[in-house]
Image: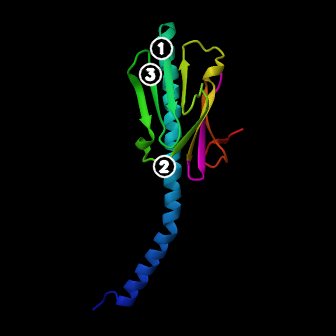
Amino acid sequence: MTGFTLVELLVALVVMAILVAIAAPAFQDLLERQRLKGVAETFLSDLRAARADALVLGLSGTVTVTINDGSSWNYTIVSSGNTPTVSRAYTDYGGAVTAAVSGWNKAGSTASFIITSVRGLDSSGTGSITFTLGSLSAKVERDVLGGVFVCSATGDLGYVTCS
């Protein structure tokens, strides 16, 4: 009769346990990187969509972006009215990602800016938000022309290194 002995089965289980123990931290790091990139890229996409909405509205309307930062951050984007077209919060991403805003007329923990169809130099619309998860961070910046881009402090998330 052929089969596995108990010793062979135990050796196979020990090898599997060692492989899982080695792979688990790397997999956790991958999940954190992807969660942080998801937050940054979603915010980037939302800002680009808000800019497109402002161009569609033309001179008849504006798009307002309001951000509350910290560990329980959230942001809303409202196009020419009171109903948010986009509303997102840290809980949408499983928490643990923090946000810090600079610029954008920040007062306390709230920052807000308006996007219009005119692409003038609007210094109140410049600013950035830095999303952090553990030792990783990604920054979404908006310049005076309304362009938005993502960078990372160390360049390790696949983005350019922030200047």
Q: Which residues are magenta?
A: 133-145
Task: Name the residue that disc number 1 marks.
Answer: 56
Q: Position of residue 46 (x, y in %)?
A: 48, 29
Name the residue tied to disc 2.
96
State which quarter of the image contains the N terminus: bottom left
Q: Residues within 10 Å of mark 1 (few under 14, many from 20)?
A: some
- Quarter of the picture holding the C terminus: top right
Marks 3 & 1, CB-CB < 8 Å contact: no
Residue 43: x %, y % from top left: 51, 34
Ranked by sequence position, the earlier of labels 2 and 1 is 1
Task: Residue under label 3, please give it.
Answer: 78
Q: Are marks 3 and 2 in contact (CB under 8 Å)?
A: no
Give me the residue at 52% from left, 21% from top. 51
Q: Is residue 162 above or below residue 115?
A: below
Instruction: Tell me which numbered mark, 3 or 2, is placed earlier along the sequence.
Output: 3
Number of the label disc, if any, that sits on residue 13 = none
* Residue shown at the point (54%, 18%) measured from the top left: 115
Looking at the image, residue 112 lies above or below residue 31: above
- Upstream in sequence: badge 3 or badge 1: 1
Hey, what amino acid is under mark 1?
Val
The CA distance from mark 3 to mark 1 is 14 Å
